Image (tube, grey):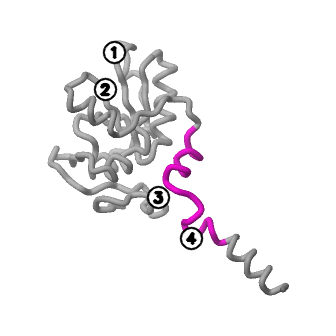
Amino acid sequence: METKSCCLIIIIGLIPFIGISQTYDEKLQSLYEHTVPTLACSELSQMMESGKQILLLDTRTPEEYKVSHLPGAVLVDYDHFDSNKFVGLDKKTEVVVYCTVGYRSERTGEKLQKLGFTDVRNLYGGIFQWANEGGVLVNQKNISTDSVHTYSKKWAVWLTRGVKVN
């Protein structure tokens, strides 16, 4: 009986390392603080298809952005956020922020809210969710691509569609 208990404890202890402890949605919920409302990929897609004017901000690094980004997205770079870039913009502008999975973009969304922007939303699941749902991506030359920078090997498991680039 003692051997069975020991094996069970070892197996339970390994669950987080073998990737079966959380679904992607559960992982996202553990990362988000829910300080910025989220927007589903399908909602953003509809907004883009309708021609609705939105400010779409990619909050990843320049290296990630070069691999691929959403069409029309402007690079903001989470690591070097410059509030001066937003001086003079209408604070009522609809803003959608995204990153790899939504953590960095939520932090950037908070900064935009502090600058007075009243309609800021975070793309739920980030570029991974967008790619996983078959959303269009473009590279630095604005050419359609299926490549996605995965940020790290640890995060790459959550990208289920497209070419993983690290």
Q: Which residue is mark 1?
A: 89
Cβ–Cβ under 8 Å for marks 2 and 1: yes
Q: Residue 81 at what x, y percent from top left?
A: 43, 32
Residue at 31% in and 31% down: 56
Residue 18: mark: 4
**Circle 2 residue:** 55
First in sequence: mark 2 vs mark 3: 2
Give the mark nearer the N terminus: 3 vs 4. Answer: 4
Marked residue nearer the N-terminal end (4 or 2) = 4
Farthest front residue?
Answer: 1
Sequence-earlier tag: 1 or 4: 4
Q: Residue at x 42, y 61 (%)?
A: 156
Cα–Cα span, label 2 and label 3: 27 Å
Q: CA distance from mark 2 to mark 1?
A: 10 Å
Give the SS element for disc 1. loop
Tell me the amino acid under the disc marked 2.
Answer: Leu
Q: Which residue is mark 3?
A: 155
